[in-house]
Amino acid sequence: MKKIITYGTFDLIHNGHINILRRAKELGDYLIVAVSTDEFNAIKKKKAYHSYENRKIILEAIRYVDEVIPENNWDQKKKDIQKHDIDIFVMGDDWEGEFDFLKNYCDVVYLPRTVGISTTKIKEDLLKVNNG
């Protein structure tokens, strides 16, 4: 069985998230999604609309996702890869090169992002609508 892992906050799920999850799953048999916890988001100075538990529930309902685990810190990726016997680490191409150090442990694939959509853009658009 070929196992894949990806990481993210996955707040305000949109078609870009679904696309990367679908393409990641197409690379193998079992997709693990590591979701940033609320505490880790605070360290990253990120604010999610949905709590970690709600984001986990939403991701578990997506057919491409086989398992959701918490992402608690920047340094756990190597441990996760070893613990879960991961074959492929996947991230969006906006992180190109950032995780090449993991190539000693598994294949690293950067998938193109879906053009024109991001959680940041959704939040900005909602602010514009609400502020007239």
Image: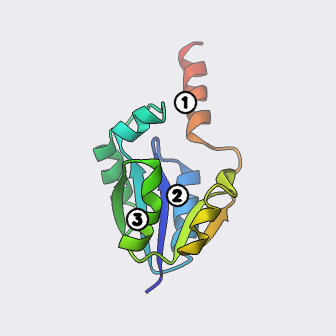
Q: Please, which residue is most extreme toward the top here?
A: 132
Name the residue type under label 1: Lys
Using the image, tell me which numbered label, if any, was put on residue 18. Answer: 2
User: Residue at the location (53% across, 53% down)?
Assistant: 17
**118 on left or right of 9:** right
Foreground pick, 96 / 103: 103
Q: Quadrant of the N terminus?
A: bottom left
Q: Quadrant of residue 131?
A: top right
Using the image, tell me which numbered label, if any, was put on residue 79. Answer: 3
Residue 42: x %, y % from top left? 41, 32
- The CA distance from mark 3 to mark 2 is 26 Å
Name the residue type under label 2: Ile
**120 on left or right of 9:** right
Using the image, tell me which numbered label, if any, was put on residue 36. Answer: none
User: Residue at the location (60% across, 42% down)?
Assistant: 118
Q: Quick one: SS at disc 1?
A: helix
Name the residue type under label 3: Lys
Foreground pick, 16 / 106: 106
- The CA distance from mark 1 to mark 2 is 18 Å
* Residue that carries the numbered disc 1 in the rendered image: 123
- The CA distance from mark 1 to mark 3 is 33 Å
